[in-house]
Amino acid sequence: MAWLLLLGVVAITAIALLSSRFGWPIYLELLSHFQRQYWLLSLAGLVAIALTRCRWPTLIALACVAVLTAPLLPWYLPPQFLQAQPEGNFRILVSNLNAKNRNFEAALAMTQAESPDLALFMEVDDRWVEQLNTLLATMPHFSGRSDPFKRGIVIYSRYPLDAVEVLDFAPDITPSITATVEVNGQQLAVVGTHPLPPVRPNLFHSRNRQLDQLGEYLQNIQESQVVIGDFNITMWSPYYRRLLRRTGLKNVRAGFGVLPSWPTGETYSLMPAWLTELLAIPIDHGLLSPELTVANVHLGADVGSDHLPVVIDLSL
């Protein structure tokens, strides 16, 4: 029994390692996103093997758990060890509202409670923009494009938005929005993007092309960069790591936890809430230039979407 359980733990470890390092085909790459789940499964296997009191299977399973801890641990290590945490003075909200969602009140209440200085909303149509425009009272600067087919993307800001563009990198990918914002005398190049979900081969390639073209675009920007959105990819995908190698950006989650943002329990009501939370993965991101300082990151309240909002506090 111990050796049989160990076989399962070793198989899980192999899937985790291979998919995150060599996950170029679509179905192998999709497996890379569940590193947290692989760690939990391997830990459960280790406990079961330890109960058999078989020494070697237990030691090998322990080694597998240690290997699977490596991709997770950096996200929980404090970013400034033994130093005072800086105070945030610029808050960013990232929220995929889901094109089918009509819980306008919840989204507006969440946004008002978080009180962001800049908010990016995705999958917005004309009705969503009509509702979100009540935010103009506190964030009077607006730009973006609505769309009934999950391609809408809009941005609201307390600070003036300069050099605003809605970019279509290619015909088969979703638009991205770019702008420059000046905060406390510091120029920030803000880019909001929403690649398509890789549920089919054509969408898989569309997402990867968008990330590649985004990386090329960012290499020509001189200001400090803030790249936000629903990337439909996790930190463990080879395509995500390729984007970071090209741009030199850092993920705001570092030191604050994995913070899985998709899916939510209300959207997938046929699944038990505990199972939805167990399967959740982090696909909504904020990427920053290395010189920018993150004060805090947390997930916002459920707004009826299949995504939880991500709230980022910067210290500028």
Image (cartoon, rainbow, N blue to C red):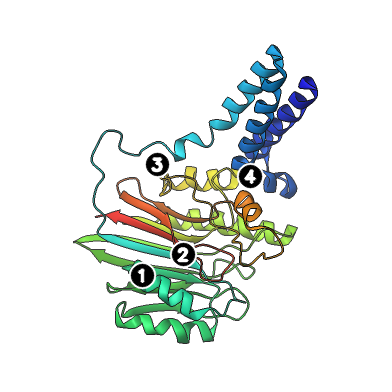
Tell me residue 168's x, y (percent).
Answer: 54, 70
> Which quadrant of the rendered structure holds the N terminus?
top right
Q: Which residue is mark 1?
A: 113
In the rendered structure, find residue 271 and report the number of the disc placed on it: none
Tell me residue 208's x, y (percent).
Answer: 61, 55
Upstream in the sequence, badge 3 or badge 2? 3
Upstream in the sequence, badge 4 or badge 1? 4
Q: Look at discs 4 and 1 and give the one toward the viewer.
A: 1
**Residue 195 placement: quadrant:** bottom right
Q: Which residue is mark 2?
A: 301
Q: Which residue is mark 3?
A: 255
Pointer 2: residues within 10 angstroms few (<14), some, or many (20+)?
some
Q: CA distance from mark 2 to mark 4?
A: 23 Å
Which amino acid lies under the numbered mark 1 shown in the image of this protein? Ala
Mark 2 secondary-structure assignment: loop
Upstream in the sequence, badge 2 or badge 4? 4
Which amino acid lies under the numbered mark 2 shown in the image of this protein? Ala
Q: CA distance from mark 3 to mark 4?
A: 19 Å
Q: Which residue is mark 4?
A: 34
Q: Can the viewer see residue 187 in this picture?
A: yes
**Residue 123 placement: quadrant:** bottom right
Upstream in the sequence, badge 1 or badge 2? 1
- Give 199 or 1, whichever is nearer the viewer: 1
